[in-house]
Image (cartoon, grey):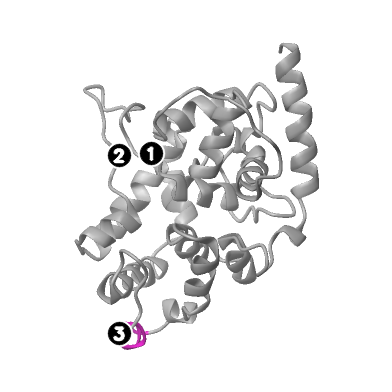
Amino acid sequence: MNKKDIELKNLLDIEVANRNNECELTLERPDPLFIAKRHNDEYISLICALFAYGKASLIIKFLDSLDFSLLNKDEQSIRKSFEKHYYRFQNSKDIQEFFIALSRLKKQTTLNELFVEKYKINNNVCEGIDNIISKINEINPHTSQGYKFLLGSNFKRDKQNSIKQVGNAAYKRWFMYLRWMVRKDNLDMGLWQGVSSEDLLMPLDTHTFNVSNKLGLISRKNCDLYASYLLTTKLKQFDKNDPIKYDFALYRIGQEKIMELKD
């Protein structure tokens, strides 16, 4: 590493150490992980992660309104309970069908098992995510614009049947979910087995993307899947076994505007 990278690594390592405590997760400092950790469950955590778009305080307000115990109840109860629920692009029907899909899936398997089934072939996290998306769509077919936005589409592949790196969405919420499930520290829950933290990809939201560009970690105009690959590759120079440990720190740096960043 050059001198600039060493200085940047030291700066980020300090931020990671300072942020690695549960005081970062409060109603005053809203983050969907705050709700997910309250339940410590892979299915509830997925709901928290996939609805994690928009203003953080409104995300928390919506998640707090959900009765997660419905995942273990009958489908009629799910439909009745969510008759008046909606969140931005998702109407009540979308929320009902999403809970029903997860309820059915939960009776059959774990998300960990579904993910590892495809991930283990080439240690590719995108393949693991793709398998979960496919199973959710298969177990309860439902289509709408809002539902597709919530769940995401299956990844596009090239002629060799490999997932394309350029031109796809960043899948930020899925990558964040994997961070919660795979990593284990004072923030992330580490509920899953059989997945290595070195294979995770950076969850690029607007804050993280802008901060990473301004710090010189990446140089890219589009916040897409390839940008996640580029940033992850760069951060592997700082910690090859756990590059995603820098995610929360980068997010908070951007969210809180705690340092003067210059182009």
Dot placed on the residue nearer the N-terminal end, 1 or 3 = 3
Q: Which numbered circle lies on residue 99? A: none
For the residue carrying disc 3, how many other residues have a C-alpha within 10 Å: few (<14), some (14-19), or many (20+)? Answer: few
Residues at discs 1 and 3 in contact (Cβ within 8 Å): no
Which residue type does callout 3 highlight? Glu
Which residue type does callout 1 highlight? Glu
Q: Is residue 203 visible?
A: yes
User: In terms of secondary structure, where does tag 3 sit?
Assistant: loop
Q: Position of residue 117 (x, y in %)?
A: 42, 44
The answer to whether residue 239 is above or below residue 37 is: above
Camera-side mark, 3 or 2: 3
Relative side of 169 to 28, left or right? left
Please tell me which residue is depicted at 30% across the width and 55% down the height of the picture. Answer: 149
Magenta stretch encompasses residue 252: no
Mark 2 sits on what residue? Answer: 155
Mark 3 sits on what residue? Answer: 83
State which quarter of the image contains the N terminus: top right
The answer to which image quadrant residue 198 occupies is: top right
Which residue type does callout 2 highlight? Phe
Q: Position of residue 75 (x, y in %)?
A: 31, 82
The answer to whether residue 241 is above or below residue 93 is: above
Q: Nearer the viewer, residue 123 or 33?
A: 33
Q: Nearer the viewer, residue 259 or 238?
A: 259
State which quarter of the image contains the C terminus: top right
Residues at discs 1 and 2 in contact (Cβ within 8 Å): yes
Mark 1 sits on what residue? Answer: 127
Residues at discs 3 and 2 in contact (Cβ within 8 Å): no
> Looking at the magenta stretch, what is its main secondary structure?
helix
For the residue carrying disc 1, how many other residues have a C-alpha within 10 Å: few (<14), some (14-19), or many (20+)? Answer: many
Dot placed on the residue nearer the N-terminal end, 3 or 2 = 3
